[in-house]
Amino acid sequence: MSILVTGGCGFIGSHACVVLLDAGYDVVVLDNLCNSTREVVERVAQICGRAPIFVEGDIRDAILLESLFSEYEISAVMHFAGLKAVGESVAQPEKYYDNNVGGSRVLFAEMQAAEVKTLVFSSSATVYGDPASVPIAEDFPRSATNPYGDTKLQVEDILEGLYQQDSGWCIARLRYFNPVGAHTSGLIGEDPDGIPNNLMPFISQTAAGIRPVLSIFGGDYDTPDGTGVRDYIHVVDLVAGHLAALEYLDKNQQLLTVNLGTGQGVSVLEMVHAYERANQCNVPYQIVNRRPGDIAECWADTRLANQILGWQAIRTLDDMCRDTWRWQQSRKSK
């Protein structure tokens, strides 16, 4: 039996392929390559000693999905496919609703038709909006401060509706915080096309001299040093949480919702200085205006994932910084 990984050539999806293959699963990757490259499949094969099956295509293509479920013995889906840039979602909301919500609807309909009802969904802490307090627990009120977060919230609601209509579904909605880092091999990592949307690639590219200076968006938040505070989690820890959720659903038929994070808040300036210390490098920066849709602080209460899944993040801030730098150095050499 195989696991279908949508968006499997992306940052988190590619690391999920590694953990699934290493655990003995067969993997089918579906990716339209709008923010990734096919080369990732070869790198995953280098790491694991075997490759996932790769299919280039879009989750909005119902005919393609029907053929995939027909051709391969797919037992579950890990759903990562989606656009994820907050700023772009503010500028082009309809693009995000069509891709993230519309695409998910098509995927779920084809899963239902194929009687494949086990799903691990890549949700996000953005569904908590601007929280009244931290750390954030799963029972906090949900809202969205930008269209990207609203697409995640809408897909969560669709999944709840599916489960209420048919309790044969086994669904994990994993709300994760800020994935960073890379595989220790240096073969796969976050490889943004054009201008990065996340902090860590900006830091790495600045440290490598690709960018002259790091722009820190906002230095006047109500935080200890004025910069935004986030819960940064190593991507390898994150995908271990996905595997734990998949294995949990194999034994428990339910709708599971859990946070995946470290439970620790780190400011942007703290991350910059940690990166400099871990990698003996210099990251020049400047404070600029806040970005629309950003909030002051956000970190997770992870007790539920610890208790239910037996999972917790184990990699340190230094691990995140060193693994990211190793990946950045491997990109420079190509």
Image (cartoon, helix red, strand yellow):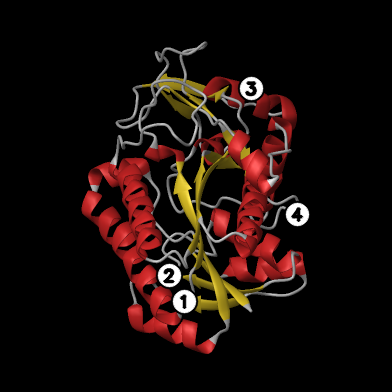
Lower sequence index among marks 4 and 1: 1
Q: Amino acid at mark 3?
A: His
**Circles 1 and 2: CB atoms closer than 8 Å:** yes
Where's residue 15, x and y in %? 63, 57
Residue at numbered disc 2: 32
Examine the rendered structure and indicate whether residue 155 appears above or below residue 145.
Answer: below
Give the label, 1 or 3, closer to the camera.
Answer: 1
The residue identified by callout 3 is 273
| Whether residue 80 is visible | yes
| Residue depicted at 62% across the width and 59% down the height | 16
Q: Residues within 10 Å of mark 4 (few under 14, many from 20)?
A: some
Q: Tag 3's secondary structure?
A: helix
- Residue 210 showing in the rendered view: no
The residue that mark 1 highlights is 56
Q: Position of residue 281 (x, y in %)?
A: 69, 29
First in sequence, mark 3 or 2: give its number: 2
List the residue tagged with mark 4: 185
